Image (tube, rainbow, N blue to C red):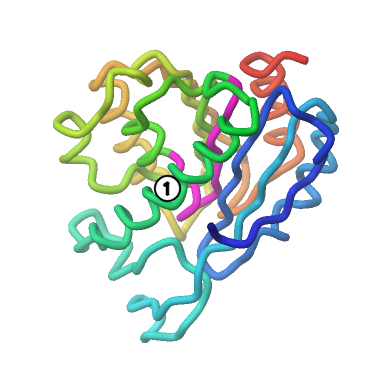
């Protein structure tokens, strides 16, 4: 398993596995976890492995999968995405083995980490409590219908995006939203006056969502 940071380790009745964005690491969202102040939830903040990233001229950085481009028609690293799906599945199964039922586990992520959360959750074979997709998109959208698992068709998905995001455009995120909705998912959509980042109001809204799907 990838190295992870765990917050609120004493909490055993709920879990959030939160993936960071490209080039960051698990420490990136530690301040957000502290702001959320949800001591009944175990937060696992894994570090992605280092790998060369084509978009950044092959520079090696923490990345869940390779990125070839950010245009709608850019090729996608299907092999890398599927490899990380297996890794995240193992993280979920590890929490289940510790006594946390799958429907008390949320997958969350920002940017590339959010893409992995959406991809993995829609294919996971046991029902999850929810999905948080922040400033992100659904990778391999054309494979969703053929690969989705019915266990998570009713799982609530919470997506948020900045209207001034120039890294992953609002239009890109909206296209993913429409694909998910067309496939039958219950999706809650939020927009904020921000760029490719998080803001205080968003954090407050995330807290409300987590309390709804993972009540104390």
Residue 64 percent location from the top left of the image: 44, 61
Q: Position of residue 152 (x, y in %)?
A: 37, 21
Q: How many marks?
A: 1
**Along the horizontal axis of the image, is 131 left or right of 169?**
right
How crowded pointer 1 is (Cα within 10 Å; few <14, some 14-19, many 20+) is rated as many
Coordinates of residue 33 in the picture (x, y in percent)? 77, 42
Q: Write down the quadrant of residue 55 in the picture.
A: bottom left
Chain part drawn in magenta? 104-117
Give whichever of 103, 107 is nearer the camera: 103
Q: Residue at x 82, y 39 (%)?
A: 8
Circle 1 residue: 116
Residue 64 in the magenta stretch? The answer is no
State the residue lying farthest toward the front.
Answer: 97
Q: Residue at x 61, y 55 (%)?
A: 46
Return the residue nearer the eye: 99 or 164. 99
Residue 118 falls left or right of residue 34: left
- Helix, strand or loop at disc 1? helix
| Quarter of the figure with residue 212 | top right
Quadrant (top left, top right, bottom left, bottom right) of the C terminus: top right
Q: Is residue 152 left or right of residue 113?
A: left
Residue drawn at x 22%, y 34% as measured from the top left: 144
Q: Nearer the viewer, residue 131 or 175?
A: 131
Quarter-of-image position of residue 145: top left
In the displayed structure, would residue 186 be above or below residue 118? Answer: above
Q: Position of residue 141 (x, y in %)?
A: 23, 41
Q: Residue at x 55, y 70 (%)?
A: 23
């Amino acid at each position: 398993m990838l190295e992870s940071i765990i917050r609120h380790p004493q909490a055993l009745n709920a879990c959030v596995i939160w993936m960071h964005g490209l080039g960051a690491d698990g420490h990136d969202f530690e301040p957000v976890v502290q702001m959320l102040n949800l001591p009944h939830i175990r937060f696992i903040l894994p570090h992605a492995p280092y790998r060369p990233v084509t978009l950044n001229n092959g520079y090696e950085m923490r990345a869940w999968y390779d990125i070839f481009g950010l245009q709608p028609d850019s090729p996608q690293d299907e092999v890398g995405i599927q490899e990380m799906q297996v890794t995240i599945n193992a993280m979920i199964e590890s929490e289940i083995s510790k006594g946390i039922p799958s429907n008390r586990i949320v997958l969350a992520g920002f940017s590339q980490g959010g893409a992995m959360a959406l991809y993995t959750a829609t294919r996971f074979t046991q029902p999850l409590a929810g999905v948080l997709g922040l400033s992100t998109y659904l990778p391999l959208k054309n494979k969703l219908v053929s690969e989705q698992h019915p266990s998570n068709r009713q799982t609530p998905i919470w997506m948020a995006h900045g209207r001034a995001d120039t890294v992953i455009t609002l239009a890109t995120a909206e296209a993913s939203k429409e694909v998910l909705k067309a496939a039958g998912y219950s999706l809650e959509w939020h927009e904020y006056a921000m760029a490719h980042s998080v803001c205080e109001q968003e954090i407050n809204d995330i807290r409300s969502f987590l309390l709804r799907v993972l009540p104390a």
